[in-house]
Amino acid sequence: MKIKIILLILLLLTVPAWAYLTELGLAPYQTAVGARPLGLAGAFVSIADDVNAAFFNPGGMPWAKGITLNYKDSGNISAGQAYPTGYGQTLGLGIIKSEVNFPFSGTREANFSSNILMASAATKLPGLPNLGLGINLKTFIGATLKRTGDPDRTASGFEVDLGGLYHVNPWLNLGVSAQNVLPGDTIIRWDNGSSEATPQVIHIGLGAKLIGDVKSPLYLEGNEFFLSSDFELNENRPGAVALGGEWAIANTYFLRSGFYMRENRNAVSLGAGYRQSSWGLDLAYYTEPQSGNQSAYFSVLYFPMEWAFEIKPTKTYKPISLADPLSDLYPPDELSTYDDRIWVRGKAKPGVEVYINDRRIFVDENLKFAVQLPLNPGKNLILIDSYYEDGKLSVTRRVFRRPKVVIKEEKDLEKELKRAKTKEEKAQLIDKFKNLEEGKDKLEALVTLGVVEVSPEADFSLEAPVTRGELCTWLVKAAHYPLPRVTNDLFRDVKKDDALAPFIKAVVDRQLMSGFADQTFKPQAPVSAEEAEKIFGKFGVTPR
């Protein structure tokens, strides 16, 4: 008898006690969230073109970017992010808080709540830019099962999803997602020492843009219709089929509907969406596959325009064969602005890929693109490349970020204007302001080009005399002379370690200026009008 008892105890220690979640028909690592996919009844595997891709098919993430926040109720909230690295890869991070309540076994009830942390990575394969592959790593950071009449149980564990998305052509997609692929029956570990496996699920999706641009089967200006399908193969349950359709109007307003079927359970979902260039809103009304409850789902999305998709290719391209591939380009060349950021936008012809400063930019369904770039003080060069088939065309835009220079004369005039009492006095001062603006504009241009340096702490005066040392620095910077190496003292008052020494040597070597008979240069002495006329005359410029 003792031997039988010992054998029974050993058997209980080596075999999982109960497959709690499988017994209830629950999917423990469920990541199907997001109002847009749920409005399509979950038929999103073949679309997967926004931040929701990680939740349904990580293979679509190389074409996705942005941040999403999803809400159903206080027990069902999720957030996700897809960040393109610029090298054809995208990294993602998501957290899903979910709670499911439903009856089982007569009058008994079950409640399963979990928090899932998910990290994602995806890439386009080299040489196959239309194929994306991705992976999700999922782990519980808290999971609790409550059943009427049974003690509460907490669980831990991790799982892996794999996904792929193939753009067969501009209007046809094929998607595959394999969820919970890790082998073994210890993926979920319960606090009582038992464990269970996670049911493996495979989704196969086929999607087609039936109405759209000139490369779609049917062209309807300003409208698109995408039909998607999803075939689910579940290890522990009968398979399921989902169909979804999305109608886009002017790429701004979206109407969605879907149909889900498993065994004798059928469900219809409805959805709507609104998009702007950098943000969007989605709403869905659907039936939950596990509990059969009807629910509303809301999502807010944000698409940072400065997040680029990929770095431009390095291979050699022939000139582009398409006339005027880009139009409505902004900014114009040689633009001056005080702003520290600037919008670069335009419109591309169908099939044209756009890169700005070597980073691919998203072109929307209306063929428009827009991205906000930071501007450095001074000169900024913006390179806009357009690619069409095997051709390339490059356009450059020079943008000058001007500093806001405050000069002494301007401050003085503002004080006088406040004290002025008569209309005549105010009119005279306003005229002086206008004349001052012309000189200030030229000064800001020189500061922008790096010729003149103005310290924010010091008052700059247009009427103050220019010293010989200052003029040397201006001449060198304006003419882009290289700074020579100074190994010996240049003059009695210009030592080799003087900050002005390289500028003075560059000017003296070119015989633009010279020292005095007493072997001094006098860098702090003001430049006389006659001296300035001689110096600028060598450049063909008459100073005023």
Image: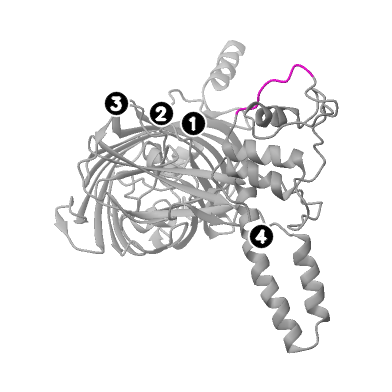
In the displayed structure, 134 sits above or below 378; it is above
Element marked by disc 2 = loop
Residue type, numbered disc 4? Lys
Q: Label 4 near label 1: C-beta < 8 Å?
A: no
Pick whichever, 338 or 85, lies toward us. Answer: 338
Residue matched to label 3: 127
Residue matched to label 4: 440
Residue matched to label 1: 159
Give how far across and how far down residue 405 sits, in percent.
Answer: 70, 57
Q: Give the range drawn in magenta.
A: 482-488
Q: Residue at the top extreme?
A: 3
- As measured in the structure, the alpha-carbon distance from the residue carrying label 1 to the one carrying label 3 is 30 Å
Q: Label 3 near label 1: C-beta < 8 Å?
A: no
Element marked by disc 1 = strand
Camera-side mark, 3 or 4: 4
Residue matched to label 2: 181
Camera-side mark, 3 or 2: 3
